[in-house]
Each structure stands twice: as structure tokens, then as C-alpha cells.
């Protein structure tokens, strides 16, 4: 059962949503070189977020990646509204840079691709924190960012196309299930 | 300062609430010739503007997950029809220490019929005589045979699809043809056939053929968003329009009923309400009153209508108002079905809800719990939503192309199962007025008290075992995080979560133990009726809405008859 407009209920009416959507589009168009001005993250942090998003869902021969899907903007918007995400992602980015400085003497974005892969391979799995308790906060951070990136990608136009969802249509009749292979 | 504005007009009937019960009463009473005024606590509904039918997630900046992502995994996300919510700013409710209870309320014309699951199941004959059957709870003062003609009327008017199955726990009705099963449903049905569990076309208030001027379903699977073609049932689109067409119907929106005002003769004479727009206290006068604000709101209104004649609240000489509160027993689990990985892309949407379901089937044997449950299920290749791949992320972790491909191969392979079972009323589960809290309109709020009994917990365990057997019989991998212990043993949902809360002004033949007579008329106050699910004596495993409409229709015909005889 839903959400509300005005003071009492908490759903966002479609008009308001469309308005916000257009505002974001306008914002994108007017900032220098058409780049997005982040609402929560610092420009440097936002650059890291974009890089991480694209690593989580990269482009391939079939579709674009998380950046093309607008996942970084989606994550920035949600984070700007949610203190819990602000702590987890904002703090997590600080953690990541500190960890990279400790290991490689430079923040994440300045690391070599090999170093970036090395640290991501470490924080992308909970089991690694069992062996190396010092990275458990990084694993938590990455899990949150992974989930939000996946949300951002697969609810985008290109993500939905990549999945092969072909509904949301007006049908005169519903055909039911085509033959199920192996059933 | 609030000013009491007296309305000079006296309507025949004032209805509080515009949902399943209020809408049905409005239609029947106005078509029967009475003048009706209806109070709705929320705003008017404008489908063209308010509904998000066919909107894609990427057309909303929060992708449907709400501000700050707070609506992720919530029943009411951004796509949902407007103004239904677990929490309403300025209108709290409380839970007594040790009790967990959630209350979903809809402040909008049509109420929760904008948001409901459209599952439209008749109660069975046995459901009306529980005490006679197993010694627990109470019998209803009416039988299935007395209600059946009203089920017929409701189904014929609103449109329900289904099939004649001749299963005693799930009486057949007046049905439109059902839609064919989806792939997920084909797989589950095969498994159920092996296990001798009936898996039959569901019964849903969605049109598979045009009916009474409404178009047939166009199979976008988005009933919960509200339907621009009114092909599913909502009171706002199906019950209110015919009432308006009579010219005898007045709708007052943003009107929060505060108290039923009683005259010196002991009869109700007005409803005092807050006009939310002006924050002023107003009154509307009528000769008879129909409470249809939802079981708990109607109980709250009665409890808040205290006077020297009725010091414990109106119609509450029995003390039963707020008591006998029940919700459905709910427990969930799911399964991963590898055969669905191989499905080519196809349109899987169907109607907004399940095409098949499992009615209660173990009524012919001894179980380790009383009463029964039915099983709802769903999954497959629906429109992707935020949270769609949380489980995949959690299970496979990692990142990169392999994660991207894994999400795609797992898309549509999960089927979730929900048991919906009968709770037996108990003395620990009820609502009363919180002595310390008022809402922003100054109206004392409800405080909920809640406890499941062992019977419900044994039922939840049985649900989990059944889900496992079905998933495994279908060659799937059972996925359930529930534990036998803890606050929610076997995954039993907190009270109110299934949104079938009812029983708070039950009907009965004995005025000492019940609030209403068998026509939903208050024993203590003849011109007050409660026609929502507050009137229910028991809460069978069947979703309550169809029965709310049938009982409200029946009560309204009785009210019409009494009005004609001048006996109100």
C-alpha cells in the first residue's frame, strides 16, 4: 500500500517528481561543461564515487555502465537527503583514501589501476574482513555503494533494456507463459 | 480560536470514510433514495494527476525509492497510489510497552481501496461458526447463506475473476474469466500438483472483460499505482461515481471526524469534525450515521465520543470497542528457480497481482494448530525496482562485469511466498485511547496492545515448512531467513503488518459481549452503524475487503428499510 504531498502525507506527486527531474536536468545543462554539481559530495569525492560506480557496473559491448545510467547522480541525491548514507558513504570515502595512503602513499584516484583493483578486490568481499579485520569498515562501505550503484543502474533506461524487461505496455490480452525451457 | 460552525442542513445519513465500506454504503443508500454526506479525512483523488501508471523508475529522481531512499522495500513506494502510509506526520499512533503494531492508513478518497492487493475471497461457511467448530473464539450472528447474496451483488458489480473449483474452504463466486498463468506460476503449480496442494486461479477484483462501463485490464501489472482505466476496483472509481450520479451525495474532503455528538434522546445527531484546511471545528447533522473509517479509526471515533450518557465511548456499554483486534498471520519465504534463468525476455506483467494461489487445503485432517491459511505468491520478470538485486549483491558480492551479468541471469528467478492465516482473538490484543497523546488536530490517538498466541506461531511454522516443500518440489533452492525463536518466530509478521486489522466493534446477538447487531447496527444507539471490518467476529484467512463490501451492502439495505419504516 504508498507515500504523500504537502504536510500530511509523504508521497511525491508525479508533477513534483517531474519538476524535480527537470530541475536536475537543467542543473546538469547549466553547470560548466555540462557536468553535474554534486549536492552532497565534494567535487573530489564525487569523482571517486563516479569511478567506483563505473568499476561496480562497467560498460560493456551490450550496454553503458553506471555512469551512463545516472547512478552517481542518484546516489548523490539520496545521500544528500539521508544522514545514514552521509555517514556510510562520506565516511567510507575518507576511509578508502586513508587506506590507500597507508598502502600506496596516495589517495584512491591517484593510485595505479593495479593498486585500485587490489584494494577493491579486498573490500568487495566480507570474507576478506575475517582475515584482515582492519578492512571491515571498507567492506561495509563498499557493500552500501554496490547496492546503490546496482539500484541506480538497473532502474535506468539502459539498465532495464540490458535486463530484457519488455513490459509496461497496454495489452489487449495477456498470453501467459511462453514454453519454459527444460520444464 | 476554533469556532463551531453549525450546518443548518440535516442529511439522511452521514458516512465517515470513503473506502470499501463507506463507498459501498454511499452507493446503496443514495441509489435507495437517501441523501448522504460523506466525510473523508484526506483530499480528493485526481487519477489523471495522482496516478503513476506506466511511469518508469528513471522518470523519478529517486527511482521510486523515496526521499533519501527511505521507501526502499516499503509497501508504499513512490509509485503507489497517493496518500497511503505507515506513518502520517502529525497523526501518530502508539504501541504499549512490549507490543509491536503497525497501522497502514490511507488519507484519500477511496481510502485503502486505492492501495489494496485486490484479492477478493469469500469467507467459507465454516468461517462464520468458529466456536461451534473448534470451541475457540465466537460464532458470527449470521451465516454464510445470509451473506452469500451480497457476495453475489458485490462480485457482479465490481467484477472479480476466478474459476469454479468447488473447494469447501474457498466458496465459488460470480466470476469473470481468469488470466492465464505466468511462467513462475506454471512452475509452482506443477510442484503443488505433485504435493496435492490445490493451486488454482486467484480471485481478484480486476476486470478481464469490460463491466458496467469500465474497460478491461490492459495487463501492465501496476494495479497498486491506481488504474486510469478503472479496470481494477477502487471505491473512488467504482462506488463513489454512482453515488454522485444520484444527485443526493455530498462529499466533504479533508474532514477528520473527531466525535459523534449525541442528543438528549440518546441518539446520534451530528459528527464533529476538523476541517483540516482551516483547522476549524465543524459539524454535520444527519438522521443516521455509518462509521466506515477502517476498523481501528471507527473504534477510535466511538471511544472518543464520550458523553454523560456514554462515559466509556459511544456504543460501548459492552466494553468491546477496541477489543478482539486481530490481523492475519503472515509469514514469508522464497526460492530461487534455476529453470527461470533460461527464459527468453517476454512480457510477464499480467494483472497487478497473482494469477494463481493456494486456498486452505488441510481442512480435512488434524493439524497442530487450529484454523487455516492460504498462500499467495509472486515473482518473475517484473519492472525492475530499487532493491531488486539486494539479495544478489549480498550473496555474490564482488563488482564489475561478472556482477552485472549475475544480476541479469538472476533477474526473474526468485519467487516469493506469503502465508495468510487466521488469528484467534485474544485478551492481550486490542486498542484503546492513549491517555497521553493527541494528534495535531487535538484528537486522542490509539494505543495498540499486541500478542500472538502459540497457535499462530505454530501456523507460521507450518507455512514455512510448506513453502520449503513447494520450492524443493519445483527444483528450486529454498530461501528463508526466519528463525524459530526471537521476536518474530518463524517469521510471523508484527501485528498490523498484513493490513487486515479488524474486529474492534464486533457484531453479535448479545449486547453484553458485542457492539453491533447482525446488521452492523449499534446495540446501544439505533441510528449508528459500523460497516467496516470493525464489525467482524473472526478474521478468517481470506482477505477481508470483499466481505467488508458484502456486509456494508447488507447493512445499508437494512438501514434503507429501517429508514422507510421510520424506525431509526
Image (cartoon, rainbow, N blue to C red):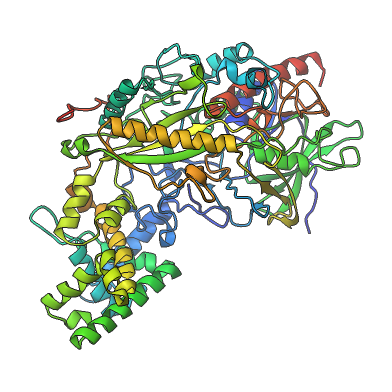
Q: Position of residue B285 (x, y in %)?
A: 78, 35
- Determine the residue located farthest toward the left in the rendered image: A61
Q: Quadrant of residue B8?
A: top right
The residue at the point 27 percent across, 26 percent down is: B186
Residue sitting nearer the eye, B36 or A169: A169
Q: Is residue B51 visible?
A: yes
The residue at the point 27 percent across, 52 percent down is: B392
The residue at the point 88 percent across, 32 percent down is: B266
- Determine the residue located farthest toward the bottom in the rendered image: A105
Q: Is residue A28 left or right of residue B329?
A: left
Locate the N terminus of chain B and report the quarter of the image it occupies. Answer: bottom right
Q: Position of residue B562 (x, y in %)?
A: 77, 17
Residue sitting nearer the eye, B369 or B439: B369
The answer to whether residue B52 is above or below residue B355 is below
Q: Is residue A30 left or right of residue B555?
A: left
Residue sitting nearer the eye, A38 or B201: B201
Q: How many marks overall?
A: 0
Q: Quadrant of residue B479?
A: top left
The answer to whether residue B136 is above or below residue B176 is below
Residue sitting nearer the eye, B149 or A105: A105
Q: Position of residue B36 (x, y in %)?
A: 68, 29
Q: Is residue A51 visible?
A: no
Q: Is residue A35 left or right of residue B566?
A: left
Q: Position of residue B321 (x, y in %)?
A: 75, 36
Locate the C terminus of chain B and report the quarter of the image it occupies. Answer: top right
Amino acid at each position: 500500500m504508498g507515500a504523500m504531498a504537502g504536510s500530511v502525507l509523504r508521497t511525491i506527486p508525479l508533477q513534483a517528481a517531474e519538476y524535480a527531474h527537470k530541475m536536475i536536468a537543467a542543473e546538469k545543462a547549466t553547470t560548466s561543461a555540462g557536468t553535474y554539481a554534486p549536492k552532497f559530495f565534494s567535487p573530489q569525492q564525487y569523482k571517486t564515487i563516479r569511478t567506483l560506480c563505473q568499476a561496480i557496473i562497467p560498460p560493456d559491448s551490450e550496454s553503458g555502465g553506471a555512469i551512463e545510467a545516472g547512478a552517481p547522480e542518484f546516489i548523490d541525491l539520496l545521500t544528500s537527503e539521508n544522514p545514514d548514507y552521509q555517514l556510510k558513504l562520506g565516511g567510507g570515502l575518507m576511509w578508502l583514501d586513508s587506506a590507500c595512503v597507508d598502502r600506496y602513499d596516495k589517495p584512491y584516484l591517484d593510485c595505479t589501476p593495479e593498486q585500485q583493483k587490489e584494494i577493491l578486490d579486498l573490500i568487495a568481499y566480507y570474507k576478506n574482513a575475517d582475515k584482515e579485520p582492519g578492512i571491515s569498515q571498507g567492506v561495509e562501505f563498499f557493500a552500501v555503494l554496490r547496492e546503490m550503484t546496482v539500484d541506480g543502474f538497473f532502474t535506468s533506461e539502459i539498465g532495464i533494456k540490458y535486463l530484457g524487461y519488455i513490459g509496461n505496455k497496454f495489452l489487449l490480452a495477456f498470453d501467459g507463459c511462453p514454453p519454459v525451457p527444460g520444464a | 480560536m476554533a469556532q463551531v460552525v453549525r450546518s443548518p442542513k440535516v442529511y439522511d445519513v452521514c458516512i465517515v470514510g470513503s473506502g470499501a465500506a463507506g463507498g459501498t454504503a454511499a452507493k446503496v443508500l443514495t441509489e435507495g433514495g437517501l441523501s448522504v454526506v460523506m466525510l473523508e479525512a484526506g483530499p480528493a483523488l485526481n487519477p489523471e494527476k495522482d496516478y503513476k501508471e506506466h511511469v518508469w523508475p528513471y522518470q523519478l529522481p529517486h527511482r521510486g525509492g523515496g526521499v533519501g531512499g527511505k521507501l526502499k522495500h516499503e509497501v508504499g513506494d513512490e509509485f503507489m497510489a497517493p496518500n497511503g502510509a505507515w506513518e502520517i506526520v502529525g497523526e501518530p499512533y502508539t504501541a504499549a510497552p512490549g507490543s509491536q503494531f503497525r497501522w497502514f492508513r490511507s488519507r484519500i478518497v477511496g481510502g485503502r481501496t486505492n492501495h489494496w492487493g485486490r484479492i477478493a475471497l469469500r469467507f467459507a461457511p465454516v468461517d462464520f461458526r468458529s466456536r461451534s467448530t473448534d470451541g475457540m473464539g465466537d460464532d458470527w450472528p449470521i451465516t454464510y447463506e445470509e451473506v452469500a447474496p451480497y457476495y453475489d451483488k458485490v462480485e457482479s458489480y465490481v467484477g472479480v475473476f476466478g474459476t469454479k473449483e468447488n473447494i469447501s474452504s474457498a466458496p465459488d463466486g460470480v466470476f469473470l474469466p481468469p488470466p492465464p498463468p505466468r511462467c513462475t506460476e506454471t512452475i509452482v503449480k506443477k510442484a503443488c500438483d505433485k504435493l496435492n496442494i490445490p493451486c488454482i486461479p486467484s480471485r481478484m477484483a480486476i476486470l478481464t472483460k469490460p463491466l458496467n462501463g469500465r474497460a478491461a485490464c490492459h495487463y501492465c501489472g501496476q494495479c497498486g499505482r491506481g488504474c486510469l482505466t478503472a479496470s481494477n476496483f477502487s471505491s473512488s472509481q467504482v462506488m463513489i461515481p454512482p453515488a454522485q450520479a444520484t444527485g443526493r451525495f455530498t462529499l466533504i474532503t479533508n474532514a477528520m471526524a473527531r466525535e459523534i455528538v449525541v442528543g438528549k434522546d440518546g441518539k446520534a445527531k451530528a459528527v464533529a469534525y476538523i476541517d483540516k484546511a482551516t483547522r476549524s471545528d465543524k459539524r454535520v447533522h444527519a438522521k443516521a450515521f455509518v462509521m466506515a473509517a477502517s476498523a481501528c479509526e471507527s473504534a477510535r471515533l466511538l471511544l472518543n465520543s464520550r458523553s454523560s450518557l456514554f462515559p466509556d465511548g459511544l456504543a460501548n456499554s459492552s466494553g468491546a470497542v477496541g477489543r478482539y483486534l486481530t490481523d492475519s498471520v503472515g509469514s514469508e519465504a522464497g526460492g530461487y528457480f534455476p529453470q527461470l534463468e533460461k527464459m527468453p525476455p517476454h512480457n510477464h506483467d499480467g494483472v497487478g497481482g497473482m494469477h494463481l494461489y493456494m486456498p486452505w487445503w488441510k481442512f480435512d485432517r488434524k493439524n497442530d494448530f487450529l484454523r487455516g491459511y492460504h498462500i499467495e505468491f509472486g515473482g518473475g520478470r517484473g519492472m525492475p525496482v530499487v532493491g531488486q538485486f539486494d539479495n544478489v549483491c549480498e550473496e555474490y558480492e564482488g563488482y564489475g562485469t561478472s556482477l552485472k551479468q549475475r544480476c541479469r541471469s538472476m533477474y526473474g528467478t526468485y519467487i516469493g511466498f506469503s502465508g495468510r492465516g487466521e488469528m484467534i482473538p485474544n485478551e492481550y490484543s486490542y486498542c484503546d485511547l492513549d491517555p497521553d497523546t493527541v494528534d495535531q488536530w487535538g484528537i486522542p490517538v490509539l494505543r495498540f496492545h499486541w500478542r500472538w498466541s502459540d497457535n499462530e506461531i505454530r501456523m507460521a511454522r507450518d507455512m514455512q515448512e510448506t513453502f520449503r516443500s513447494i520450492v524443493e518440489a519445483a527444483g528450486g533452492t529454498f530461501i528463508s531467513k526466519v528463525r524459530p525463536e526471537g521476536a518474530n518466530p518463524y517469521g510471523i509478521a508484527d501485528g498490523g503488518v498484513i493490513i487486515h486489522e479488524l474486529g474492534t466493534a464486533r457484531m453479535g446477538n448479545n449486547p453484553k459481549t458485542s457492539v453491533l447487531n447482525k446488521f452492523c447496527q449499534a446495540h446501544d444507539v439505533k441510528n449508528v452503524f459500523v460497516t467496516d471490518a470493525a464489525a467482524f467476529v473472526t478474521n478468517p484467512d481470506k482477505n477481508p475487503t470483499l466481505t467488508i463490501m458484502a456486509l456494508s451492502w447488507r447493512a445499508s439495505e437494512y438501514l434503507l428499510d429501517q429508514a422507510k419504516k421510520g424506525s431509526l
